[in-house]
Amino acid sequence: MDALEQGMSANSSITAPATLGDVGPSRDDLLASRYGSVFWNCSLTRLERWIFPVCALASMLLQLKPILYSSLALPLIVVMSSLCWLTPTTGFFYIACAQFLPFPEGTAFNPAQIGVATWIGVTFLRYRRIDLTGISLLWPVLPWLIWHWLVTGEPIYHFNSEYSKALAYSVIACQQVNVSKGSYLKCLLGMSLGTLMAAAAFWAFQLGLPVDLSTWGGEREGYARLGGVRADAVMIWPPLLMGCFGMLGIALSAMVSGRYERQIHWLKIAAVAAFFIAIPPLVATMTHGAYAGFALMAIFVVLVYNRMKRMRLIQKRKSSLTPIVLSMIAILSVVYLTNAFKTRDRVDALYHYFQESVDEYGAAASRTDVWEYSLKTIMKHPLLGVKFNDDAEDIPPEYFAYGGYLSHNVFLDYGRWTGIPGISAVIFFFFYPLLRLWRRSDNWRFMGFFLFHFALLIFWMSLSFQFYKTFWGYWMLAAMVAAREPVALPYSNRHSARLQL
């Protein structure tokens, strides 16, 4: 056991203070400063080592028709969620996969709702209390919600509103961060692993198991847009994007730290495995956002990595990203060239479909029309939007039959509904934890958070799903890390630098 682990073991009775105090150091923080922050340690405990495979197996079983349509499904979800709440890392795993976890059709409660109920019970049994120290960091959501309520009159405060349900997962995340005792990178690891479970249905189907994949959304160039069992294609690709790039970011953070060499080695392997797990089902969604998002994420990683190399934040051969990149390129090349899982056919078909869409709609393909109409509405109703007086707005021709439309962009939706003040409040809330992390002098430590947040940005820019539970849990985690994690001790001059693109 190294000095850090010995120190933390000897001082395990030290707990966080009763109030966060924006930012005065807690005794945990001072202890972390003395022994080196526990932030870096992603080693799984004995309990986590058996909970993860058990819950991953449960998630796989829920994809199978004989299980999903039997009386076993609901108890299996209850057991899975209960086990996950036993540790903060596995808790974040459940927060990430609860959104798309299959559940029996027609049941009164979905996995996200079941998760809230089991969290309350398990938390009181295991910890004897619910510790919401730091929940005040959620304050940036208030300008958004209060303005929306004042302008639209929507009862967002109602117990059963979608806003309340989403905020419930921020509350759960707050508790999980508090009991993690500083293992924040490991919390993000749990969340990244949870998002990768979105690939479970695809791989179960490829193995010939009895799985009904969702094809809601139709076909493109003769290929069905494959999703999960209950989640359609547009609900599957965002978590896959978060998972593979989140794992890569965590590996990058560990490589820069230079600590726990065995951990760096397995995180590299895990990052490569994440890409192999995520890419085929990502391609099978046949979604422009998935493909474009992957390309944007890859470009962002290259830019940041080159910047880190120039700043000499990464020097050692053992901390090189090159083996990971080469491994990923090799895997993707083999999958494409061999047309495994019809990957090449799907990529070529979507490219052809995209070209046709660009010719018909414009540069952003099928999004061009709704974005243009959304901007027109915002310019026409800049202060209060269309909701205040229930004004009519111009509708894109392809949505006439529906009598309304969504912008396929969360920010533009709120701009239409509540004007420029509304969209500004949403933007402030979304970027708040990211900016706080980026402005830190040791921001190179948070590459996993930056990549995960960037994937969420692509998600919000492409779809109108503002109540995605993974986002709300992650937001709370990132905000608390930005406020609580002490600035790293500069164990070498190169690590005192601040990453700037």
Image (cartoon, rainbow, N blue to C red):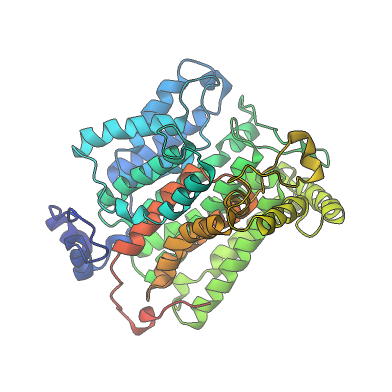
In this picture, residue 422 sits left or right of residue 122: right
The residue at the point 33 percent across, 81 percent down is: 492
| Residue 34 location (% of width, % of height) | 19, 70
Q: Quadrant of residue 442?
A: bottom left
Residue 13, compared with residue 210, is above or below; it is below
In this picture, residue 275 sits left or right of residue 284: left
In this picture, residue 210 sits left or right of residue 103: right
- Foreground: 329 or 427? 427
The residue at the point 29 percent across, 38 percent down is: 86
| Residue 313 location (% of width, % of height) | 44, 78
Residue at the limit of the structure toward the top, as seen here: 71
Residue 96, compared with residue 431, is above or below; it is above
Please identify the quadrant where the N terminus is shown: bottom left
The residue at the point 86 percent across, 52 percent down is: 360
| Residue 292 location (% of width, % of height) | 68, 57
| Residue 151 location (% of width, % of height) | 52, 47
